[in-house]
Amino acid sequence: MKKTLIPLLILSFCLVALTACGGGGDTAPALSGTYVFKSIQIGEDVFSADQVSALGLDASTIYLEFLDGDDCRLMLAGEETAGTYAVRGNSLAISSDGGMDSMTIDGNTIIMDDPELGGVMVFEKQ
C-alpha cells in the first residue's frame, strides 16, 4: 500500500505547487538556486529521497528552482511549471495559473506543509 501511496502523495503535493508555483510586492531578499527534494512525512512516517526513488518515483527529478527576479519553476519527473514567488520573513508564496501555495523557509530548507494532503515535503538548497 505505501509503495503506491507515497509516490501518489508526492505527485499530489507537486500538483498543488504546480498550480501554485504572482509574487511581487513587498519581498525579502530573493531566493536563488535549486532546492532538491529531501523527504516527505506522512503522518508519523518519514521517507527520504532514496526511499521514494526505491518506490519508483525518481526523487532527483523533483526540485524547486529560483531564477532571476521573482521567477521560479517546479520540476517533477521532467515536467516543468513556471511561476513567480514572494518572500516575506520566513514565508514563501509561490503562484501560477491563478493558484497560490505557502511554504516556510528555514535556513537552506523549504518546507511545504499541506494539511489537506496530510503530509510535509522538505526541499534543501543544492
Image: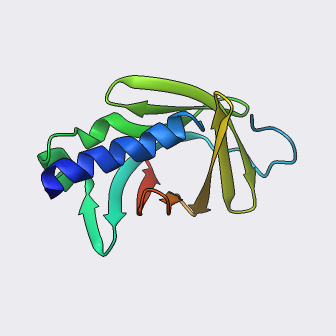
Q: Is residue 112 left or right of residue 47?
A: right
Front residue of 6/86: it is 6
Say which quarter of the image contains residue 107.
bottom right
Up/down of 30 relative to 122, above or below? above
Q: Is residue 101 left or right of residue 89?
A: left
Question: What sort of colour scheme is used for the picture?
Answer: rainbow
Q: Position of residue 83 (x, y in %)?
A: 63, 29
Q: Which residue is found at the position 64% from the left and 27% from the top? A: 97
Residue projecting furthest to the right: 26
Q: Is residue 57 left or right of residue 34?
A: left
Q: Which residue is found at the position 31% from the left and 29% from the top? A: 77
Q: Position of residue 64 (x, y in %)?
A: 49, 39
Q: Which residue is found at the position 46% from the left and 24% from the top? A: 80
Q: Position of residue 99 (x, y in %)?
A: 65, 37
Say which quarter of the image contains residue 63.
top left
Q: Is residue 71 left or right of residue 17?
A: right
Numbered circles on residues, count: 0
Q: Which residue is found at the position 57% from the left and 26% from the top? A: 82
Image quadrant in which the N terminus is located: bottom left
Front residue of 124/9: it is 9
Up/down of 52 relative to 11, above or below? below
Residue projecting furthest to the bottom: 44
Front residue of 77/119: it is 119
Q: Position of residue 2 (x, y in %)?
A: 17, 57
